[in-house]
Amino acid sequence: MKILQINAVYGTGSTGRIVADISDTIKRAGGESFVAYQSTIEPVENAFVMGSSFTRKVDALRARVFGLQAYGSKRATKRLLRWMDEIKPDVVHLHNLHSHYIHLPLLCKYLAKKDIPTVITLHDCWFFTGKCTHYTSAKCNKWQTGCGNCPQLKKDIPSWLFDRTAKMWKDKKELFSAIPRLAVIGVSDWITNEAKKSFLQNAKIIQRIYNWIDLQTFYPREENIREQYHLPKDKFLIFCIGAGWNNRMEKWRDLLRLAQKLPSNMHIVLGGSVQSPQDLPDNITSIGYIHSTENLAKLYAGVDAYVHLSREDTFGKVIAEAMACGTPAVVYNATACPELVGKGCGYVVKTGDIDGICVALQMIQEKGKSAYLEKCVAYVREHFEKEKLIEDTVALYEAVQR
């Protein structure tokens, strides 16, 4: 079986690691794995690199000026299609396409014309909206019937001048509906059920396959992170992580509110790049972006609790990673977050309820992390085990070809 995966990145970030895991599994099973991407940590065999950093910057500017996303990179996409003619993949698996490196209409029309079995993974909501990666905070359901007059025009990838969301929604509906053998993977029950309300509902297969956790990396261990990161020796440590933090984000405002209300014997460890770390209160220590999964696992294992302040997640992999390391999680009752926290693995609180987070943290402190550890690890092993979920993905490849 020849599988081609297309994603913005390879081997880095959550989606890039997923692509690499699938690729490794295909090759171990004797199949042929091909990947197309715009960037990677190191060169990959059987790979096609999309465009250049310069052309992507030009396409990013065009998207902002003209309001059309994934309508640039024509030359790079035509080269990709010629390469696909050569390798003749049995299945094409689409991951994140909204990073200014591919021309969506050219790609989809090719897949439809050639009748190539196609798989979409919904790492966010972009595949079935006009432009939004998420829409719940905006309380917008236009994606169910047709976008336009977008309330989030200036968010995600902003459009400076024109609202082209009606066109992009209509085009996506026509393009994906024309692919005869289309399968849709939702990475949680929440996003899978949302897809069933969209124009993707007519796909040949719609199936939930959770994102997986590498239990060889994420597991309970004794880690002294306090000395390494200069953290208080005698305080209850709370870990919060995000790709980035700035004052335009709701999660940033929630973080500062949480810091104000925490008791004096608790301290927040903040992962991810911070716009102004010098402005953080004394009970937050910023440790910057964590590039190594091994260091990330040590942090999960070394803290007392994990708090997830995101309000919009199709999965929330960091929640499951923390639990895999034996650390209880506190999450909002929003999008896919609550389905990741099993009974006895932490707490789900009302979205935006900072007092509720504080109460949950105090309960964890009183019971002790050890009271949650076994249930956290068992829940992750049962629901997010890597080998089983990749097997499900390969089985879907076989099913969509029939």
Image (tube, rainbow, N blue to C red):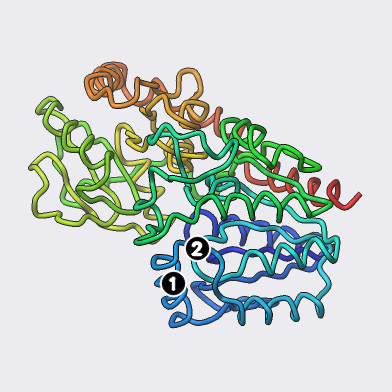
- The amino acid marked with disc number 1 is Arg
- Left or right, 120 with respect to 132, comes to right
Give the percent coordinates (x, y) of residue 315.
51, 39
Q: Nearer the viewer, residue 347 or 364?
A: 347
Give the percent coordinates (x, y) of residue 98.
52, 60
Could you say whether the residue bearing mark 1 is in a helix, strand or loop?
helix
Give the percent coordinates (x, y) of residue 187.
60, 41
- Cα distance, mark 1 to mark 2? 8 Å
Picture quadrant where residue 87 is located? bottom right
Q: Badges 1 and 2: C-beta atoms under 8 Å apart?
A: yes
> Is 231 placed above or below 349 here?
below
Q: Which mark is on residue 62?
A: 1
- Left or right, 292 with respect to 266, comes to right
- Left or right, 202 with respect to 325, comes to right
Residue drawn at (61%, 56%) of the image: 95
Look at the image and tell me in which quarter the N terminus lies. Answer: bottom right
